[in-house]
């Protein structure tokens, strides 16, 4: 495998919930030893980027915060560049709302131009109802990512996807979704690493987000079977990865 940069999913790829996937630390060390740039990408917008950076450090990964790109950071950058001056109502945890605001986006509680939907583990009926009313009045719906479920140590939790569909149906709108599989997130990561997106590879455990993003962007992909996707899922899918490996532990032996 000879690639200019690695985009690496987190949940289900280098860890699952709070459990480290064996061989993941050695994989990152191999990339660093060979001078291959990498960025961790996660669709999970339940927490700030600092949360994921600190989690990786606690698990033993030799990384900096610049090695992490979340769907919330990607969405914030999109709003700042493509919706300048727009006011947003954020459906998110307090730390995520703070991250959006500190990035320079105008966060409001009333009369927003945009309803900014994240994976909100602190969601309440009040938040849902406010977002519903804002959308019915014409606010744009922008979501950080489309995932239906989020992996935990033992199983999966409901993620943002069902809420996107609820708001789309109830408000007769269509969400703009920024995270994987939108190729925008891959392009942001490549720009961050200073490499051509076409020479990169996306590593992940989900066909419909990780591998699909690589397919849409025209890049190589590595599906690892350490997370959501099984071999049976792969056999029944029309999304075909470039490589299929049991886990990231198998990658170092294949690097040139």
Image (spheres, rainbow, N blue to C red):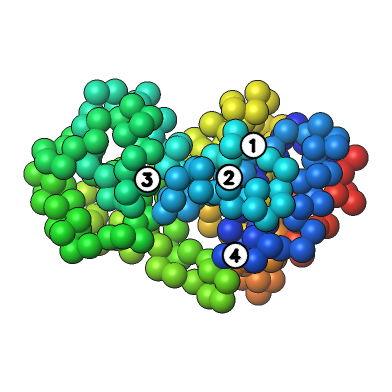
Q: Are marks 2 and 3 in contact (CB under 8 Å)?
A: no
Q: Using the numbered discs, state the Cα–Cα distance from disc 3 to disc 1 in whole angstroms.
A: 20 Å
6 up-or-down from 240: above or below: above
Q: Residue at x 80, y 40 (%)?
A: 31
Quadrant housing residue 107: top left
Work out whether mark 4 precedes mark 1 in sequence or the reverse, and give the earlier one. 4
Q: Residue at x 76, y 52 (%)?
A: 25
Crowd tier of the residue under label 3, counting other residues whose Cα lies within 10 Å: few below 14, some 14–19, many 20 or above = many
What residue is shown with label 4? 18
* Quarter of the rendering occupied by the N terminus: top right
Question: Which residue is situated farthest in the front direction here?
Answer: 58
Work out whether mark 4 precedes mark 2 in sequence or the reverse, and give the earlier one. 4
Label 1, secondary structure: give it: loop
As rendered, which of 181 and 52 lies closer to the eye? 52
Label 2, secondary structure: give it: helix
What residue is shown with label 1? 64
What residue is shown with label 3? 96
Q: Are marks 1 and 2 in contact (CB under 8 Å)?
A: yes
Label 4, secondary structure: give it: loop
Residue 53 — which label?
2
Q: Residue at x 40, y 68 (%)?
A: 158
Residue 117 visible here:
no
Q: Is residue 198 left or right of residue 48?
A: right
Label 3, secondary structure: give it: helix
146 up-or-down from 85: above or below: below
């Amino acid at each position: 495998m000879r690639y200019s940069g690695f985009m690496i999913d987190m949940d289900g790829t280098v860890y699952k919930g709070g459990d480290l996937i064996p061989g993941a630390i050695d994989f990152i060390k191999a990339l660093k030893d060979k001078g291959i740039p990498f960025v961790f990408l996660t669709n999970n917008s339940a927490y700030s980027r600092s949360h994921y950076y600190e989690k990786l450090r606690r698990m033993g990964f030799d990384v900096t915060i610049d090695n992490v790109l979340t769907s919330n950071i990607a969405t914030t950058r999109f709003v700042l560049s493509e919706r300048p001056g727009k006011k947003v109502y954020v459906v998110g945890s307090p730390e995520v709302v703070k991250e959006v605001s500190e990035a320079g986006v105008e966060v409001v509680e009333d009369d927003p131009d945009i309803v900014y939907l994240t994976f909100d583990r602190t969601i309440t009926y009040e938040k849902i109802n406010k977002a519903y009313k804002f959308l019915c009045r014409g606010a744009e719906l922008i979501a950080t990512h489309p995932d239906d479920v989020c992996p935990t140590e033992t199983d999966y939790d409901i993620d943002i996807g069902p809420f996107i569909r609820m708001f789309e149906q109830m408000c007769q709108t269509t969400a703009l979704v920024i995270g994987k599989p939108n190729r925008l997130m891959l392009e942001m990561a490549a720009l961050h690493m200073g490499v051509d997106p076409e020479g990169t590879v996306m590593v992940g455990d989900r066909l419909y987000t990780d591998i699909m993003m690589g397919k849409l962007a025209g890049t190589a992909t590595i599906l690892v079977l350490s997370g959501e996707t099984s071999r049976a899922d792969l056999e029944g899918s029309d999304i075909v990865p470039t490589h299929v490996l049991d886990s990231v532990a198998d990658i170092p032996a294949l690097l040139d």
